[in-house]
Amino acid sequence: MSSAAKQILEAALELPVEEREQLVHALAASLPNDFAGKDIENAWLAEIGRRSDEIDAGTAELLDLADVRAQIAQRRARRTGG
């Protein structure tokens, strides 16, 4: 990173959160559309591979859909007090 970019970064980090968010969006909009796409895709492929390996090795905890739905219902009931 150039010294100019470092100075800009330091100044940006002193901005309030809302202004930093606006800055991030403006900078992201200025980049090519596929800027993060390849990194995100590679991260997902790595995660899928890791999970697949865990399933194949028998180390993954697999849940039935009914169990997952029951867990979600319990969490919702706790949040709403009912």
Image (tube, rainbow, N blue to C red):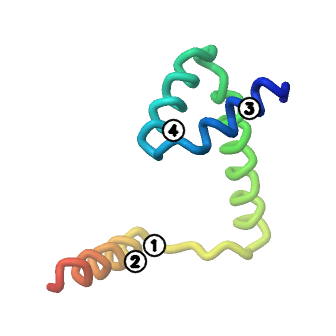
Q: CA distance from mark 3 to mark 1?
A: 52 Å
Q: Picture quarter containing residue 76?
A: bottom left
Instruction: Work out whether mark 1 precedes mark 4 in sequence or the reverse, and give the earlier one.
Output: 4
Q: Amino acid at mark 1?
A: Asp
Q: Are marks 2 and 4 in contact (CB under 8 Å)?
A: no
Q: CA distance from mark 2 to mark 1?
A: 5 Å
Q: Nearer the viewer, mark 3 or mark 2?
A: 3
**Which residue shows up at 84% across the image and 25% down it?**
2
Residue identified by numbered label 4:
20
**Picture coordinates of residue 26 (x, y %)?**
50, 23
Q: Amino acid at mark 4?
A: Arg
**Picture coordinates of residue 12 (x, y %)?**
60, 36
Figure quadrant of the N terminus: top right
Q: Nearer the viewer, residue 70 or 12?
A: 12
SS at badge 4 = helix
SS at badge 2 = helix
* Mark carried by residue 7: 3
Image: 16 above or below 63? above
Q: Are marks 2 and 1 in contact (CB under 8 Å)?
A: yes
* Mark carried by residue 67: 2
SS at badge 1 = loop
